[in-house]
Amino acid sequence: MKLIPIAAALSILSAGAAFAQQTVAPGADAMMAGPGIAMGKAATMPLKYVEIKDADIVTSKLIGVEIYNKANEDVGEISDIVIGDGKSVIGVVASVGGFLGIGESYIVIDPASLALADDNGTWKAYVDTNKDDLSKAPKFDYSKLKK
């Protein structure tokens, strides 16, 4: 089983997204977020392409990945990835608790506290916690996000 720190794998993805934008002439409505994805309506650099390597993973492969603890108990599932200020992955949204989508809640986990493993072709995430501690974690509410 090969373990990959999630922060390293995801930081490659967020950097690559900046290069996939179409070239647009810089305009007054562009706000530069620093290295990474430009926040605004105009790209801040010419279009570039990125070569994906074997060690890279795309976020679409992470959504739905089950999260396990050290006792190999299923404690949640990856629901989303958070990119802060267009620069890097700052959080992994996990659904925890509930059954068949009823009673579940969302928490945001620091990517450095997760590990990913390719277990015979199936991705799994691992954390050092238990279900009780996750149920007490600060809740994340999608409805409070700015649109």
Image (cartoon, rainbow, N blue to C red):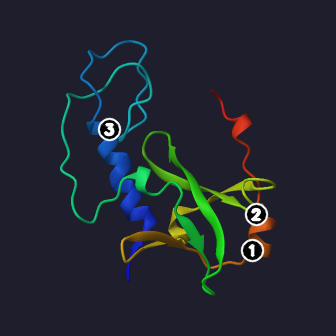
Q: Is residue 1 left or right of residue 23?
A: right
Where residue 18 is drawn, which disc sits there?
Answer: 3
Q: Are marks 2 and 3 in contact (CB under 8 Å)?
A: no
Q: Position of residue 34 (x, y in %)?
A: 39, 38
Q: Residue furthest top?
A: 28
Where residue 97 is drawn, which disc sits there?
Answer: 2
Identify residue type, mark 3.
Answer: Ala
Q: Are marks 2 and 1 in contact (CB under 8 Å)?
A: yes
Quarter location, residue 18: top left
Mark 1 neighbour density, 10 Å: few (under 14) some (14–19) many (20 or more): some
Quarter location, residue 49: top left
- Lower position in the chain sequence, tag 2 or tag 3: 3
Quarter location, residue 11: bottom left
Q: Which residue is mark 1?
A: 131
Q: CA distance from mark 2 to mark 1?
A: 8 Å
What element does badge 1 sit on? Answer: helix
Quadrant where the C terminus sits is: top right
- Lower position in the chain sequence, tag 3 or tag 1: 3
What residue is shown at x 60% (from left), y 62% (from top)?
Answer: 77
Identify residue type, mark 2.
Answer: Gly
Q: CA distance from mark 3 to mark 1?
A: 36 Å
What element does badge 3 sit on? Answer: helix
- Lower position in the chain sequence, tag 2 or tag 1: 2
Q: Is residue 115 left or right of residue 68?
A: left
Q: Is residue 143 above or below residue 29?
A: below
What residue is shown at x 52% (from left), y 62% (from top)?
Answer: 65
What element does badge 2 sit on? Answer: loop
